[in-house]
Amino acid sequence: MPRDQPDLPIPEDPEPERSLRATWLGVVVILVLLVVGIFLVGRIGRMVAIQDCVAQGRTNCAPIAASPRG
């Protein structure tokens, strides 16, 4: 069976270094978003706990910061 069209070469990426840089930039952005998300989840969790305490009518809801003795 003869073919009418010859095999065309697959074009290569003209700038592989730029593609690799974009990949690493994407990884860094995702990691930053993950760290910020984890921080916000913890912070919002603490705020919710205080709000629940206040909503129950308690008066000693604020966390007490212990001062270092020296």
Image: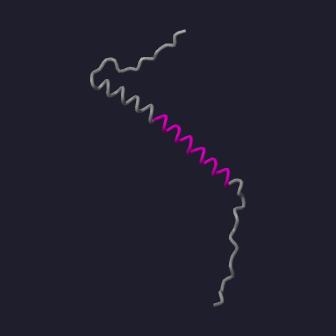
Q: State which quarter of the image contains the N terminus.
A: bottom right
Q: Which residues fall within the magenta stretch?
A: 19-40
The residue closer to the viewer here, 67 or 37, is 67
Q: Is residue 29 left or right of residue 64?
A: right
Q: Is residue 61 above or below residue 2?
A: above
Outermost residue on the front side: it is 70
Quarter of image, res 45: top left
**Image position, residue 22 (x, y; %):** 64, 51
Q: Is residue 41 left or right of residue 30?
A: left
Q: Residue at x 44, y 36 (%)?
A: 41
Q: Is residue 47 above or below residue 14?
A: above
The prevailing secondary structure element of the residues shown in magenta is: helix
Q: Is residue 9 left or right of residue 34?
A: right
Q: Residue at x 49, y 34 (%)?
A: 39
The residue closer to the viewer here, 18 or 24, is 24
Q: Residue at x 37, y 30 (%)?
A: 48
How did the renderer colour the structure?
A: one colour
**Image position, residue 58 (x, y; %):** 29, 20
Outermost residue on the top side: it is 70
Outermost residue on the bottom side: it is 1
